[in-house]
Image (cartoon, rainbow, N blue to C red):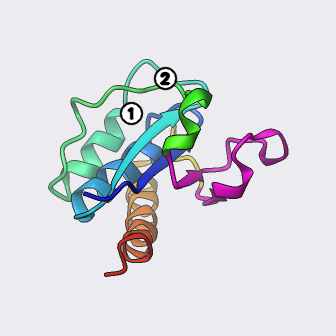
């Protein structure tokens, strides 16, 4: 394991960031990811759990977490799904935006589309971070 820590952030930490964290940690060998929300929901979205199970990854035991600004120095890269005001964010130099639509309230087919887009981006990110 390297010192590399990646943080995925979305509004509720119930869908996109949870999926990204799970894919990252399943694929990475020498780095790790966490996720958080700016306004965390009470639980992970059941459709996110369902579509991740289709890939063999179980996130049913995950809990939503609030973004802790005091921990930002722990992360080499911070990926936002469009929920952070970049101009006011303290770690702008490490902040990246992945503009992927929030699947909350949408169909399972839309969840699958979002899941697949996140997986592709996470696969590329793992290669960048780990040089694989």
In this rendering, position of residue 128 left or right of residue 92: left
As drawn, the residue found furthest toward the right would be: 87
Magenta span has 98?
Answer: yes
- Residue under pointer 1: 45
Q: Residue at x 44, y 26 (%)?
A: 65
Q: Visible in this render: residue 106? A: no
Give, as a single range, the part of the protein colored magenta.
75-100
Magenta span has 86?
Answer: yes
Q: Dividing the image into 4 quarters, which one contains the N terminus?
A: bottom left
Q: Visible in this render: residue 42? A: yes
The residue carrying pointer 2 sits among few (fewer than 14), some (14 to 19) or many (20 or more) residues within 10 Å by Cα, namely some
Q: Residue at x 14, y 55 (%)?
A: 56
- Residue under pointer 2: 41
In this rendering, position of residue 78 left or right of residue 117: right
As drawn, the residue found furthest toward the bottom would be: 132
In the rendered image, residue 106, in percent from the top left (x then y), is placed at: 50, 44
Callout 1–callout 2 Cβ contact below 8 Å: yes
Determine whether the residue tagged by mark 1 lies in a helix, strand or loop. Answer: loop
In this rendering, position of residue 43 left or right of residue 72: left
In the rendered image, residue 42, in percent from the top left (x then y), is placed at: 43, 18
The residue carrying pointer 1 sits among few (fewer than 14), some (14 to 19) or many (20 or more) residues within 10 Å by Cα, namely many
**Which mark's residue is nearer the viewer, 1 or 2?**
2
Along the viewing direction, whichever of 54 and 78 lies nearer the viewer: 78
């Amino acid at each position: 394991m390297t010192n590399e820590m990646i943080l995925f952030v979305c509004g509720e930490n119930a869908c996109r960031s949870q999926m990204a964290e799970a894919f990252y940690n399943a694929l990475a060998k020498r780095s790790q990811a966490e996720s958080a929300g700016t306004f965390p929901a009470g639980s992970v979205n059941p459709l996110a759990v369902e579509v991740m199970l289709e890939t063999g990854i179980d996130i049913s035991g995950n809990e939503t977490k609030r973004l802790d600004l005091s921990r930002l120095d722990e992360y080499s890269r911070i990926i936002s799904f469009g929920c952070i005001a970049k101009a006011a964010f303290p770690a702008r130099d490490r902040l990246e935006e992945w503009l992927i639509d929030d699947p909350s309230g949408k169909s399972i087919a839309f969840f699958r589309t979002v899941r697949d887009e996140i997986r592709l981006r996470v696969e590329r990110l793992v290669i960048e971070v780990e040089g694989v």
